[in-house]
Amino acid sequence: MATEQTLNQEVMQSIIKRYPRSRSAIMPLLHYVQSICGYVTNDGIEFISKLLEIETAEVSAVATFYTQYKRKPVGEYHVGVCTNTLCAVMGGDAIFAALKEHLDIENDGVTADGKVSLEHIECNAACDYAPVVMANWEFYDNQTVESAKTLVDGARAGKPPAPTRGPNHLVTYKEASAVLAGLDDGLAREGVQAGGPTLLGLKLSKEGK
Amino acid sequence: MSKLTPVLSAHWDEADSFTIEAYTRHGGYTASKKALAMEPDAVIALVKDSGLRGRGGAGFPTGMKWGFIPQGDNKDHYLVVNADESEPGTCKDTPLLMANPHVLIEGCIIACHAIRAERAFIYIRGEVTHVVRRVNAAIADAYKAGHLGNGIDVTLHIGAGAYICGEETALLDSLEGFRGQPRLRPPFPAIAGLYARPTVVNNVESISSVPAIINNGAEWYQSMGTEKSKGATLYSLSGHVNNPGQFEAPLGITLREILELSGGVRNGHKLKFWTPGGSSTPLFTDAHLDIPLDYEGVSAAGSMLGTKALQIFDETTCVVRAVLRWTEFYKHESCGKCTPCREGTWWLVQILRDLENGTGSEADLEKLLDLCDNIMGRSFCALGDGATSPITSSIKYFRDEYIAHVTNGACPFDPVKSTLFVGAVN
């Protein structure tokens, strides 16, 4: 349960200070609440409304508009399968169907152990790596039904494989939410600078093509 | 000679390309030094002369946009960078920021100087944790090195999963702490943008293109591209091809050329349909392989250059399924503000679902087109317009395929054949 004690006032004030007008801080503050509570709790909404001196309804209006803000707990590892057209056609639909069956949950469901939640997501700007799966919004490129199952099985065992283009290990949902609140976790230098498809044009130009 | 012209992507193959050390090693932050020594108006003139146009989809001349900011008005001015890359098929800004966030920060410094802004906001989508880390670290390193903090500040703002926030006025509402819903224009952001102050909103690639223009000059930039579409840009190839990826080439290259140099459509298959610039741009077919991919060429052929997101689909793909899925996306992402888009996209999905599963009728096609007619141009922003593009263009080129679903009473395609792992799943 989020309380004023678990949410760090100092951190929240530092987020507010990034902006010329305090209301602009509402989105990073909601990410911050998720980093502490795992989702946007009622207490979190109330606390933000007090800090920003706006109505709780105004905070709720924002929290319910954006799909990344969750109003109920998600898994420690939140898995999103891209089922927008290109990924869907290239295997995303098959992956999503297989994961639902494998985990025995529906879209937006969480496994009973609280480890993995599943969601079908929209285009995540990695189409040259299709089909794409995201876990805690880190890239798992060129997925297959098998590799996606390995990912969620690893996550349930507490040992998820590392992202394809991301840090050396997969952070938890709460830890990722802190990054999305704009807080530094010191992992920016980990991982590749680019994957193969990103570099293909450059490589071909060097070959004179 | 290579048809490709890597400028933005020139050093992406170095393992530390995202660091300030690597960026500085390749001449990074010399352009901002040069620009800061110039009169702001001279910077605007140089960018105007270069012919650089917006790379976020609309292709509006960047220098002209900067020139719209009123000067001497004693108001705060803002630069807002749109890094909310979400248009289906679009995947250029995300790898750019992962591989070299500093080029954007240097571009921000130059643009802020030109429009007399003391602060830039970078609005990045929230679903890319590692890119957020890279950009945040780059901003911190730019402060440490003294490139930021001496009259120009950059603040990273992280979104939370709403496609509509890629629309510039919805983005501004979101940045102000509201639901991301588009504003009625006028007033345009240049007059009343962020916090009702004069604001320039530019795409990541547009701003990132500026440092090289400052260093190499307008003539150099003009030497690439076509008559009205100057310079080079990132083309993103994805889908049923042997080798997908990013290709930085002069504007005006054709899909045939990109396919030839990259290895073509996946072996044993042939091109069926493709998008030139994301799902909001009307579909092309194999009849459009030689259209010059510049703003004018694509427009003359009935589509839009958009974000240069070349999504390739081969003959195994059911166009009705593809279009239904895009339509479900627009329905989900419609912000709900304008009735034609909110209600219209909902009805489009209902009808397309029937058509796709074989329970529709031929008359549904006319109903779809009629709905599209009533959505197009009737809302504050272009989301609804974009939703009509795949529908009207697919009916134009593939009416028979829609009819085949009706006469068959089912979809005639096997979705397994379209997958990347077709050999493995059976």
Image (cartoon, coloured by chain):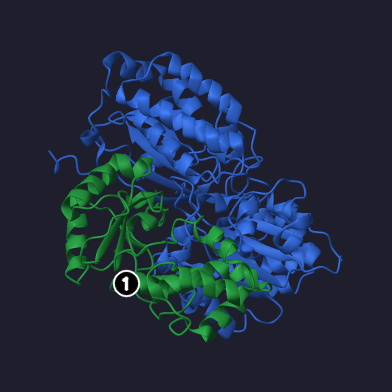
Chain colours: A green, B blue
Query: Residue A157, relative to residue A100: is it above or below?
Result: below
Q: Pointer 1 indicates a residue of which chain? A: A
Camera-side residue of B97 and B83: B83
Displayed quadrant of residue B145: bottom right
Camera-side residue of B137 and B32: B137
Query: Residue B71, relative to residue B405: is it above or below?
Result: below
Classify residue B199 as left or right of residue B178.
Answer: right
Under mark 1, the amino acid is Thr
Camera-side residue of A145 and B98: A145
Residue at point 40%, 49% (across, down) = A122
Q: Position of residue B121 (x, y in %)?
A: 62, 67
Displayed quadrant of residue B421: top left
Classify residue B174 as left or right of residue A130.
Answer: right
Decide: few, some or many residues near mark 1? Use Cα within 10 Å; few <14, some 14-19, many ≥20: many
Label 1 sits on a secondary structure element that is: loop
Q: Position of residue B287 (x, y in %)?
A: 44, 24
Q: Position of residue A3 (x, y in %)?
A: 45, 79
State the quadrant of the C terminus of chain B.
Answer: top left
Classify residue B62 as left or right of residue B134.
Answer: right
Query: Residue A39, relative to residue A18: is it above or below?
Result: above
Residue at point 45%, 18% (across, down) = B365
Residue that mark 1 sits on: A172
